[in-house]
Image: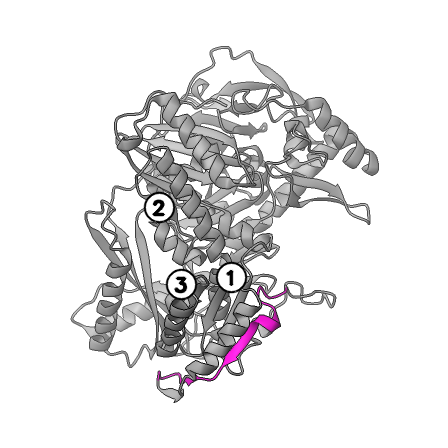
Amino acid sequence: MSASGPRPPEESRIGVDVGGTFTDVVVTSAGGDIYTYKLLSTPRDFSEGVVDGIREIIESHDVEPADTRDVVHGSTVATNAILERKGALTGLLTTAGFADVLELRRLRVPKLYDVTWQKPEPLVERSRRLEVVERVGVDGKVVTALDIDDARRKVEALVELGVESIAVSLIHSYANPSHETAIGEMLAREHPDVWTSLSHRVLPVIREYERTSTTVLNAYVRPVVASYLEALRGKLDELDVTAPLLIMQSNGGVMTSEAAAERPAYVVESGPAAGVIASSGLARSLGVDNAITFDMGGTTAKTALVEGGEPHFTAEFEVASAMSAGSRLRSGGGYALSVPFIDLAEVGAGGGSIVWIDPAGAPKVGPSSAGADPGPVCYGKGGREPTVTDANLLLGYLNPGGLLDGAVKLDVDGARAAFEEKVAAPLGLDIPVAAYGAHLIANASMIRAIKSVSVQRGRDPRDFTLIAFGGSGPVHAMGIARELGIRRVIVPPQPGVFSAVGLLEARLEFHAKKTFLRRTAGLSRSELQAEIRELEAQAREGVGHGSLHTVSFEFESWVEMRYVGQGFELPVRLPAFTDDWSSWTAELEKAFAEQHLNTYGHVTNNATEIVQLLVVIREQSPAGVPAGNRPDSQPDESNQREVFFGGEIGLLPTPVLRRGDLTATPRQAPMIVEDYDATTVVPPGYRVFRDRSQSVIIEEDSS
């Protein structure tokens, strides 16, 4: 596979996004040029694909490794360890009486009337969840002193069971962490080879289940992530790429690899977050206030909401369920992870998702994926199960000559034989009809995810623009937009590596958070400002890495609020402080009411209260996605192929264009637009043009 684009300038930045099927590498210059390379991921050791991609960029464009400013990485290592249950053997130390918190969870089930549903097994078995003698009250006062000898015996018991990592989550440690600190110091002193995660360092807030679950997840993946990052750092050094290694967080900011190794729970959704950051920058640059981001890769599809040019955030997330989603959509089918997240939804539907027939004879798509090894049948690497990519190839959507400008050859006959045997024949359908059915089923799964971040948030998707990217996103975008009534779709430049572009748009960021339970009506100005100053100091300490070239920072102060008596809260940004305190509190309550109305569709006259304080420190840097290189053109516009657009439209001879063939003058669909890293499929009924950002704009044809 060959890299694309001309030689980059002297100083370069490298972004690497690892997906389940492809690894994407992007180099940008200070002037905004983008140079891309895409290769199949290496599941046995993802760092090999990362280094291979960076090496290709360096060698193809004569990049001096010493001139690299930084390497920003979006990794699926933590996510995969959770999904595949391949994390460390983990133990849990908790307060006497709380060993079953992971079993009790919350009273939520994904299917209300499904009596056969089984909740997921805790990541820590009951035999490795041990209780210690101690108790701290909600006010931080010690109720029962820590018995350190008892704690030592429990640690020894866990070590004898072979645990590699220990999570420590004591009741109310967010109010007084002294007992956790003492256990942590004992572990560091007596068992330095055992990884340790303390809940007051991972998540110092109320709610014992969410805090314990998050700390356990952190402990579960910490050895895996730390080992991966250490190996990657070593391989980068061998390439003489000694620039800082930064890791994308789930909140859209980046942190150093050292910080990520300590708090891997913060990087579980790092790849999807990068795509939302890139989409937000593109939306702002194009003056698009409201957008839905749609990122479909080889394994999963991710979607999020952008309003006013900014993404939404959530304080809770649920991973390893049928649909990973934010707090208001948590079904109880996964593991609670209460760290800052971009509020997105993720489903197991991608180009590599396997198409299969269930025992009742109904066709299904995913969630199992062929991944990068062996990959779809058409990749010719030993895959035997038909996938969505195989279906799209048989429909004429993908170039039969190969992907990535022919670097990945495609076996059309193999895909046809597999689809005939395992899908079309069992259903008694012609291959195009069966393939289109698989395409629609995949769309339905992704439509469900889009509705979860729009309709279920009180937003009408018809009021939004769809930004489609990822290797498979532009193939499916128009069918999804048509089903949802979305009239405008944007396919950005470099769509197949757009998440990697977002990595280089992210800024160094740290979130300092604490519980601050106060009624809004009785809020003390001096107390609130003192707590914010304390959190700002913690945020400065957390972000202060001298090896990074951060010049200045900005702060954002947030609260998580609710009506008194509610079980969950909503994030609200604090208004700028004014001299009139009563007016200020009224403005805060108004902002909460607007958020509550947008989320739940109603407001009440009930009293409100603050539950958490959050201070975000963020590196100041220019915003906006680089414009990218001018797309290459294919002068011969007579190129076309037969494309199947469903039963109502049927098989049509369809022009196949390059992005450079498009201009500011709209052209009528149908058409296929082929980029180096992705393919855009546009059925009849739309007009297509290219704007100043080199984005492909697709709009309903009202003529």
**Marks 3 and 1: which is nearer the front?**
1
Tell me the magenta residue range: 121-140
- Which residue corresponds to mark 2? 246
Density class for disc 2 (Cα within 10 Å; few <14, some 14-19, many ≥20) is many
Q: Give the SS element for disc 3.
A: helix
Mark 2: amino acid: Leu
Density class for disc 1 (Cα within 10 Å; few <14, some 14-19, many ≥20) is many
Q: Give the SS element for disc 1.
A: loop
Could you tell which of marks 3 and 1 lies nearer the N-terminus?
A: 1
Could you tell which of marks 3 and 2 lies nearer the N-terminus?
A: 2
- Which residue corresponds to mark 3? 595
Residue drawn at point x = 40 percent, y = 85 percent? 137
Residue 123 included in the magenta stretch of the image: yes
Residue drawn at point x = 50 percent, y = 40 percent? 46
Instruction: Give how far apart the Cα atoms at labels 1 and 2 are.
Output: 26 Å
Coloring basis for residues: one colour
Does residue 435 sit above or below 453 in this rendering?
above
- Which residue corresponds to mark 1? 164
Residue 413 on image: x %, y %: 72, 22
Q: Are marks 3 and 1 in contact (CB under 8 Å)?
A: no
Residue 291 on image: x %, y %: 43, 45
Mark 1: amino acid: Glu
**Marks 3 and 2: which is nearer the front?**
2
Q: Give the SS element for disc 2.
A: strand
Left or right of 397 in this view: 459: left
Could you tell which of marks 1 and 2 lies nearer the N-terminus?
A: 1
Residue 308 on image: x %, y %: 35, 49
